[in-house]
Image (cartoon, rainbow, N blue to C red):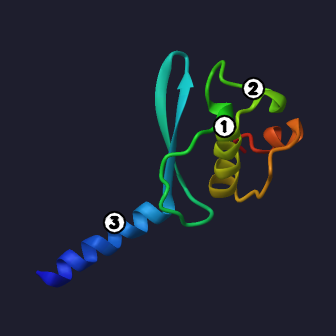
Amino acid sequence: MKYVLLAGVFALLVVVLNIGYYNEVADGEVNTIYFVKKTPTLRMKFFNIHANDGDYRKVETLSDELRQDIIDYCKYRLGIETEVKTQADVEMCAKM
């Protein structure tokens, strides 16, 4: 019984560290998109600025929190390290 519990905890940890998701709004419908992270982290929910209708913003108007969300998405979803300082950086983080 102890080994089954230990195996379950291990499997849950592997899933949490390696699977992430974000919500995508398309045609008024919200879809959850799951992905395998490029780098393990305990964070599971991410924000993809390009997956939301009407949520696209210019780099000059990004809040620090939204900028960090984009940086995290790029790193863990796409494996891209960026500081999101230019509009090209924001475009680079578009879903490939």
Q: Are marks 3 and 2 in contact (CB under 8 Å)?
A: no
The answer to which image quadrant residue 58 occupies is top right
Q: Which mark is residue 57?
A: 2
The answer to whether 20 appears left or right of 38 in the picture is: left
Q: Residues within 10 Å of mark 2 (few under 14, many from 20)?
A: few
Q: Which residue is mark 3?
A: 12
53 to the left or right of 29: right
Identify the residue at horizontal 71%, vertical 41% (top origin): 67
Identify which amino acid the numbered label 2 is placed on.
Arg
- Please determine whether, in this image, residue 3 is positioned above or below residue 15: below
Residue type at mark 3? Leu
> At 42% across and 69% down in the image, what residue appears?
14
Q: Quadrant of the N terminus?
A: bottom left
Q: Earlier in the sequence, mark 1 or mark 2?
A: 2
The outermost residue toward the top is 28
Q: Quadrant of the C terminus?
A: top right
In the displayed structure, does residue 29 sit left or right of residue 66? left
Q: Name the mark nearer the viewer: 1 or 2.
A: 1
Above/below status of 51 relative to 38:
above
Q: Position of residue 41 (x, y in %)?
A: 53, 63
| Real-space Cα separation, disc 1 to disc 2, in angstroms | 10 Å
Label pair 1/2, CB-CB below 8 angstroms: yes
Q: Nearer the viewer, mark 1 or mark 3?
A: 1
- The answer to which of marks 3 and 2 sits earlier in the sequence is 3
Disc 1 target residue: 66
Q: Eyeballing the image, is 35 above or below 18?
A: above
Secondary structure category for the residue under label 3: helix
Query: Which circle's residue, 1 or 3, is located before the other in the chain?
Result: 3
Q: Position of residue 94 (x, y in %)?
A: 74, 40
10 Å crowding of disc 1: few (<14), some (14-19), many (20+): some
Label 2 residue SS: loop
Q: Find residue 34 and report its horizontal and vertical position in percent.
A: 49, 47
